[in-house]
């Protein structure tokens, strides 16, 4: 079943993993915040149809993120200052 607990947790992990691949700090952080917020907001849903609807939306989002990561890697930019502060030392 698409909306099973294991499938949902796997989707969550895949969304987080793919979002961390983004070169752009702003896109990466936005995606991570958005994913965590959406899963936190919908964690109490009990209706099977609603769960499947959210799951399918998540799968679509994962495919979009994968495509955007590839496109973003073709047009890389210099790291922002906020990204380099933690790497000093």
Image (spheres, grey):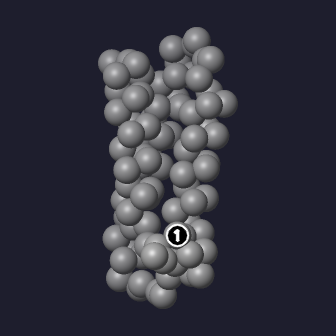
Residue furthest to the front = 89
65 left or right of 43 in image: left
**Residue 2 shows in the view:** no
Q: How many labels, in total? A: 1
Looking at the image, which is closer to me, 18 or 88? 88
Residue at 47 percent across and 87 percent down: it is 77
Give residue 53's position: percent from left, percent from top.
52, 29
Decide which of 23, 62 is in the foreground and name it.
Answer: 23
Residue 40: % across, % down = 62, 31
- Residue 3 picture location, percent across and down: 41, 22
The quadrant of the rendering that contains the N terminus is top left
The answer to whether residue 83 is left or right of residue 22 is: right
Residue 47 showing in the rendered view? yes
On screen, residue 24 above or below 34: below
Dividing the picture into quadrants, the one containing residue 70 is: bottom left
Label 1 sits on residue: 86
């Amino acid at each position: 079943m698409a909306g099973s607990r294991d499938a949902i947790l796997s989707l969550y992990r895949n969304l987080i993993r793919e979002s961390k691949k983004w070169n752009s700090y702003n896109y990466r952080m936005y995606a991570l915040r958005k994913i965590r917020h959406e899963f936190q907001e919908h964690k109490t849903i009990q209706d099977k149809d609603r769960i499947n609807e959210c799951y399918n939306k998540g799968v679509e989002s994962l495919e979009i993120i994968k495509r955007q990561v590839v496109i973003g890697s073709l047009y890389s930019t210099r790291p922002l200052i906020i990204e380099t502060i933690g790497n000093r030392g």
